[in-house]
Image (cartoon, grey):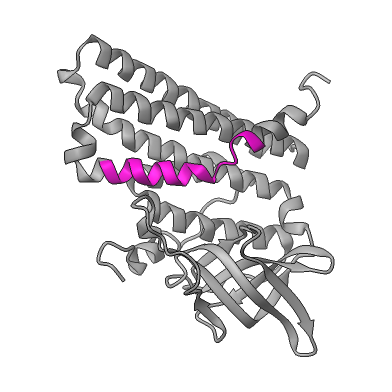
Amino acid sequence: MPASSIDRDDLVAHTADPWPLPAHGDTVELWRRLADLGERDLPLAKLVEPHHDAVAILADLGSTTTAPGDVWAVWAAEPPFAVVEAENAPGGWTLTGRKAFCSGAELVSRALVTARTPDGSRLFAIELPADGVTVDASSPSWSGAGMARARTVTLALDHVPATPVGAAGAYTDRAGFWWGAIGVAAIWLGGARGVARVLEDAQARLDAHGRAHLGGVRADLVSLELAFDAASVLADEAKLETSEVERLALVLRARTSAVVESVVSRVGRATGPGPLAFDAEHAARVADLQVFVRQDHAERDLESLGSMERLDD
């Protein structure tokens, strides 16, 4: 493991104690914690958030509880080139196939994994390390600098024992699925704040154009923070239907993605190539954020939002 990889002790320190569950009374604190961690360390946040999301998923679906010391991952990407099939054999469920985009696989102790069943996609819990779980050597290795510390790999699963968590479709049918999607966007917000720090630090040296960019960055970030705070009130008090939470998540994620792109662009235009060339921490943060925000589905999510009923109907 490279020296720059995430230390498991750092991961355990952020997962040992429970964080607020979304839509359970203190959502603003949950999203602020995620944003603060994203501002400090995006790859670490990439591993911490799924653990707390897993705890929320298990609470929603009334399934397996966590044990002290557990560090969970959630691996739910289902690209066509990496498919996992679930088989209900006499000895119990097993998973076989390839699961892509498994971040922190060597650091976690348990994972929630989606797999195909005759009834549709279903969520399963597995323990790690486990016989039958290996890194798939035939898949491309992570080559880009962005998010490299998250150690994302493709795993090969060969009849790995698994425990069902909820019925087929239950994972994505929850309102909690969309509250979790907003939690990821909160990390993007934090990452944008981290990128903006180099511009804030340069304020005294900025010309009029640079100060205009700084003003634009501040306007973007403050307005987005207010949007998250307002959404947290809805989460805790409005008792939204799942479809309403989905709409809110798509709006917040689209807005956050746009702010990220604006902040990265404005900071670069105001400061020139210097910070990207000579400030290793800033350059890494920009690279991490640009990869991380591509977890957004971009125009596909905007199409979904545009296909929904009018807000005033």
Q: What percent of the width, then of the height, locates residue 127? A: 57, 78
Q: Is residue 295 magenta?
A: yes
Question: In this view of the protein, which residue sits in the foreground, 295 or 109?
Answer: 295
Q: Residue at x 67, y 49 (%)?
A: 177
Outermost top residue = 208
User: What segment carries the magenta color?
Assistant: 283-300
Q: How many marks?
A: 0
Q: What percent of the width, then of the height, locates residue 54? A: 59, 61
Tell whether 20 sits left or right of 6: right
The answer to which quarter of the image holds residue 218 is: top left
Give the answer, above or below, for where 107 lies relative to 177. Answer: below
Q: Quadrant of the N terminus?
A: bottom left
Q: Residue at x 73, y 61 (%)?
A: 61
Q: Is residue 31 magenta?
A: no
Q: What percent of the width, then of the height, locates residue 19? A: 51, 54
The answer to which quarter of the image holds residue 151 is: bottom left
Q: What percent of the width, then of the height, locates residue 118? A: 83, 69
Question: In this view of the protein, which residue sits in the foreground, 178 or 263?
Answer: 263
Q: Residue at x 50, y 68 (%)?
A: 139
